[in-house]
Amino acid sequence: MAEQRPIQLVIADDHALVAEGLAKLFADAGGFRVIARCRNGEEALQTTLAMRPDVLILDLRMPLLDGLGVLRELANRQSPTRVVSLTAEAKDEELVELMKLGVAGIVLKDSDWSQLIQCVRRVHAGEQWIDQRCAQRALGRVLRRQAGVEEAGRILTSRELEIVGLVAGGLRNQEIADRLCISVGTVKIHLHNVYEKLEISDRRELTQYARSRSLI
């Protein structure tokens, strides 16, 4: 029987000691081969595209290009490499974005390292592995957003909801008008109606409303 090929890994972490520790972890576990270590997101992206490893272990916080940026580029280029995101912490919206981008695994750095080994093996086998704490937080945010949209949708029109999201995202009236292909005057009318319906007075309060209901 032919010997099974080891799982080809690229490790991307800007902390040299962490990268070295991970490389030793996989070497000791057996069945893995670390073919490259990367210190920033740009290097991780180019190395992954060139070497096409089975699995990329990617720190979410990386210089030059963060983990989300790497994932977006890999998705755009239809890379076959499966990605495991390794992070010390992640905001709820980042967790949701990771899942939308098709990350195959999410492991928190304070987890037992045996979980990372198990995660990579299962991801390589075509499964998905999401740390339970991350999954619960992401699901909670999705449910809060769904509830927030339903609540706001009983008060605001779909266009008004769209404008609320853009205002809360920091866009000015002209930028909103350009994005939606409407006039600035129309944007102002919509905002006036939103303020009246929600009984608020300015963009700051509107942004607070949107955040409290996970609309952004």
Image (cartoon, rainbow, N blue to C red):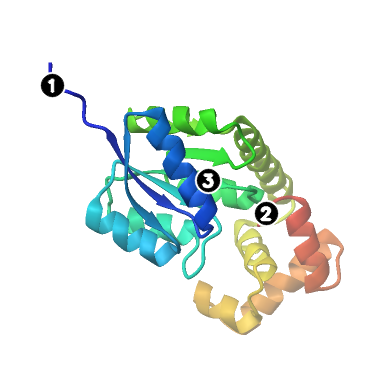
Q: Which mark is residue 215?
A: 2
Category of crowding for the residue at label 1, using alpha-carbon neighbours closer than 10 angstroms: few (below 14), some (14–19), many (at least 20)? few
Q: Position of residue 172 (x, y in %)?
A: 65, 80
Q: Which mark is residue 86?
A: 3
Q: Are marks 2 and 3 in contact (CB under 8 Å)?
A: no
Real-space CA distance between mark 1 and mark 2, rounded to the nearest whole angstrom: 54 Å
In depth, the one of 92 and 51 nearer the eye is 51
Q: Position of residue 36 (x, y in %)?
A: 33, 53
Which amino acid does the dot numbered 1 rest on?
Answer: Ala
Q: Is residue 103 visible?
A: no
**Image-quadrant location for residue 37:** bottom left
Secondary-structure class at tag 3: strand
Q: Position of residue 97 (x, y in %)?
A: 53, 50
Real-space CA distance between mark 2 and mark 3, rounded to the nearest whole angstrom: 27 Å
Q: Which residue does the image show at 27% across and 45% down from the upper left?
A: 80
Q: Is residue 190 left or right of residue 103?
A: right
Real-space CA distance between mark 3 and mark 1, rounded to the nearest whole angstrom: 32 Å
Q: Which residue does the image show at 76% across and 73% down from the upper left?
A: 192
Q: Position of residue 139 (x, y in %)?
A: 62, 36
Category of crowding for the residue at label 2, using alpha-carbon neighbours closer than 10 angstroms: few (below 14), some (14–19), many (at least 20)? many
Q: Is residue 147 left or right of residue 25?
A: right
Q: Which residue does the image show at 82% across and 73% down from the upper left?
A: 202
- Mark 2 or mark 3, which is nearer to you? 3
Q: Which residue does the image show at 80% across and 61% down from the upper left?
A: 208
Q: Quadrant of the N terminus?
A: top left
Say which residue label 1 marks: 2
Which amino acid does the dot numbered 2 rest on?
Answer: Leu
